Image (spheres, grey):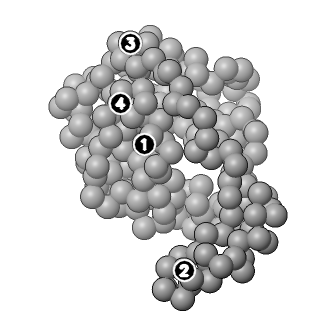
Amino acid sequence: MARSEVILQNHAVNIARRTRGDIPTTMIWLFWGSGKVPNVPPFKDIYGLNAALTSGVDILRGLARMTGMEILNIPGVTDGLDNNYTAQATGALEAFKKHDLVVIHVEAPDEAAHAGSVEGKIEAIEKVDKEIVSQVRSWNKDTLRVLLLPDHSTPISVQTHVGEPVPFMLWGQGFKANGAHRFTEAEAKSTSIFLEEGYKIMGRLIE
């Protein structure tokens, strides 16, 4: 992969592309796009729920589509710090008219962490809390259960993904407090609750 970047830098095709004002090809990623589409069972067949997803990240939209989830195309939802959090929450809650479960994915905190921006990550998390979580908490149409969690850890110190466990919170009817007072990694560790196999958390949400 690294060699492809060197070879393509002054390749005739890229010289022509730059001359035309087109974006040059910079690298060949051998493990992206190859292989076959896996045979993934529909989400509804596994959990018995009609689900939808809102996200500005194409890979997540693709994964959701493979499992039969509806993709919510909400104007203003992006994969960056300019994401319209309010519109995303409003659109997600509106989707409950047709769906049993809605996944709200926000990429902004991760993008800020990759950029090494402490201020950007704090701002993104605060907006998730103020503009998305607050709307979800105010929902009063019917009984709602919520699972809140990061999809992975991206520490500012390394600006990339690491394999550390992430905190999660289950809120709603049937869930009891476990003594934690803050949504942080340190507070999560203090509860001694740990799921070795992350996919099993869906069972806790819908049990």
Q: For residue 69, which numbered disc appears in the image?
A: 4
**Distance from the alpha carbon under mark 1 to that under mark 2:** 30 Å
User: Which of marks 3 and 1 precedes in the sequence?
Assistant: 3
Q: For residue 76, which numbered disc appears in the image?
A: none
Q: Which residue is mark 2?
A: 17
Q: Which residue is mark 1?
A: 61
Q: Nearer the viewer, mark 4 or mark 2?
A: 2
Residue type, mark 3 in image = Asp
Residue beneath the point at 37% across and 49% down: 132
Q: Badge 2 local density, few (<14 within 10 Å), some, or many (20+)?
A: some
**Distance from the alpha carbon under mark 2 to that under mark 3:** 47 Å
Q: Which residue is mark 3?
A: 45
**x and y, in percent, of residue 121 in the image:** 59, 62
SS category of the residue bearing label 4? loop
**x and y, in percent, of residue 53 in the image:** 37, 38
SS category of the residue bearing label 1? helix
User: Which of marks 2 and 4 precedes in the sequence?
Assistant: 2
Check the image and report above or below for 14 versus 150: below
Residue type, mark 4 in image = Met
User: Which of marks 2 and 1 precedes in the sequence?
Assistant: 2
